[in-house]
Image (tube, helix red, strand yellow):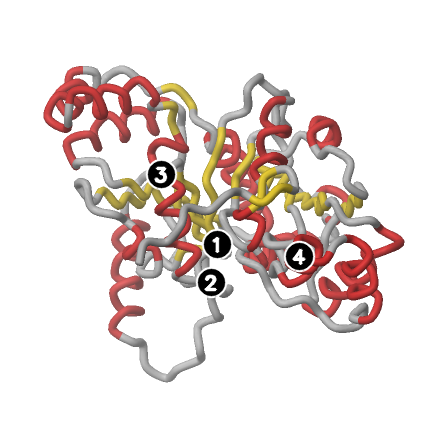
């Protein structure tokens, strides 16, 4: 899985990369601008978003599917002065920017910030409309990767990505297989009043923060075997899941606020929203987080109850879950959700095994 970037080692001589960054910083600092300078990727928490998650491009996508690439690019060029409407990742990106503003107030020279990268397979000609839309909304997105029809997945590691958000589930699966935290985003079906001052991120547990090892037991042997297994292994940490490193990255930035005595005013809040029962299987989860040295602000054990109503109260900017029926229930009630296509849960829907196509000999 993607790891937190290590601190720069103390070296007597600057590497070629360091010299390049020093020269770029000197040039940027010489310019008179109020635009914040992007942090070094190795210091930042890098969030890569696709153009279709950042903006609502449903109509444009239909033109591409119905009429082909040339018509699509022509339409985008013709309408490049018309801002695109916000998409599912838009509130999340705005919340990331707010955290950056708070961090810069407390640590003016620090580069431990969120860095947002637009990662898209759009043609470069479409880039003008994307840039105009970003500037229209005042978003701080300086790094772009436009691959002209090719998959951008190969660039994620080069951009040192901590989290990749896309509308394309195939690309998300490819990213997870490359060890990068990733999820497929869905727009909520009704508007929700989200916080302007606090980034709120909600995670499912099994097959999201943790591996699917315990979920396999539930699916294959039932709840009683699962409860027995969790009790026997209460002090054995669960293996990490695809989103563990993103929670770790959030915790790293949270601690910067705690160090300034800002715990009660921290602009990042994390939630564990799990279908597990607390008394029967919750201890192992909490002990695993403790072993990892990670904190979660709120832990909610639902014992199989629907997640949607509770998420409606939390109002997260993004909710990660591995099972589509939880995603569907959440977005119906106004929660922006992100599906993590990982683990045994992909073979089931609402607890029932999905019939798999027979393999041809």
Seen at 30% across and 62% down, the residue is 21
Seen at 32% across and 50% down, the residue is 29
Q: Which of pointers 2 and 3 lies earlier in the amino acid sequence?
A: 2
- x and y percentages locating residue 165 in the rendered image: 43, 42
**Residue bearing mark 1:** 181
- x and y percentages locating residue 206 in the rendered image: 65, 54
Q: Is residue 43 left or right of residue 221?
A: left
What is the distance, in whole Å, between disc 1 and disc 4 at their CAs?
26 Å
Label of residue 220 in the image: 4
What is the distance, in whole Å, between disc 2 and disc 4 at their CAs?
29 Å
Q: Which of pointers 3 and 4 lies earlier in the amino acid sequence?
A: 3
2 and 1 marks in contact (CB < 8 Å): yes
**Residue bearing mark 3:** 50
Q: Nearer the viewer, mark 3 or mark 4?
A: 4
Nearest the camera: 43 or 53? 53
Q: Residues within 10 Å of mark 3 (few under 14, many from 20)?
A: many
Q: Which of pointers 2 and 4 lies earlier in the amino acid sequence?
A: 2
**Residue bearing mark 2:** 2
Which image quarter: residue 44? bottom left
Seen at 32% across and 81% down, the residue is 13
Q: Nearer the viewer, mark 2 or mark 4?
A: 4
Nearest the camera: 167 or 130? 167
The answer to whether residue 102 shows anywhere in this view is no
Q: Secondary structure at mark 1?
A: loop
Farthest residue toward the right? 279
């Amino acid at each position: 899985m993607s790891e937190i970037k290590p601190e720069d080692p103390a070296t007597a001589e600057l590497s070629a990369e360091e010299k390049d960054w020093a020269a770029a910083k000197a040039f940027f600092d010489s310019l008179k601008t109020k635009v914040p300078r992007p942090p070094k990727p190795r210091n930042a928490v890098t969030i890569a978003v696709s153009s279709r998650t950042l903006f609502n491009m449903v109509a444009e996508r239909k033109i591409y599917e119905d009429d082909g690439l040339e018509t699509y690019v022509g339409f985008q060029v013709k309408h490049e002065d018309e801002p695109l409407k916000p998409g599912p990742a838009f509130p999340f990106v705005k919340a990331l920017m707010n955290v950056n503003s708070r961090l810069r107030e407390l640590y003016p020279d620090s580069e431990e910030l969120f860095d947002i990268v637009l990662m898209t397979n759009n043609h470069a000609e479409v880039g003008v409309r994307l840039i105009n839309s970003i500037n229209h909304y005042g978003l701080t997105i300086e790094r772009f990767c436009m691959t002209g029809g090719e998959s951008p997945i190969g660039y994620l590691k080069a951009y040192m990505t901590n989290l990749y958000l896309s509308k394309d589930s195939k690309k998300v699966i490819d990213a997870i297989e490359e060890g990068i935290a990733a999820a497929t985003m869905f727009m909520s079906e009704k508007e929700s009043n989200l916080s302007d001052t606090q980034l709120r991120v909600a995670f499912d547990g099994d097959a999201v923060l943790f591996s699917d090892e315990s979920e396999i037991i539930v699916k294959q042997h039932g709840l009683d075997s699962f409860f027995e297994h969790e009790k026997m292994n209460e002090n054995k940490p669960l293996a990490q899941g695809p989103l563990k490193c993103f929670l770790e990255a959030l915790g790293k930035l949270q601690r910067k606020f705690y160090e300034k005595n800002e715990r009660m005013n921290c602009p990042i809040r994390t939630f564990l929203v799990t279908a597990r029962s607390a008394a029967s299987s919750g201890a192992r989860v909490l002990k695993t987080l403790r072993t990892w040295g990670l904190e979660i602000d709120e832990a909610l054990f639902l014992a199989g109850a629907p997640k949607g109503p509770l998420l409606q109260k939390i109002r997260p900017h993004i909710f990660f879950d591995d099972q589509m029926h939880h995603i569907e229930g959440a977005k119906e009630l106004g929660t922006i959700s992100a599906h993590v296509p990982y683990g045994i849960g992909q073979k089931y829907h609402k607890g029932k095994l999905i019939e798999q196509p027979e393999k041809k000999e």
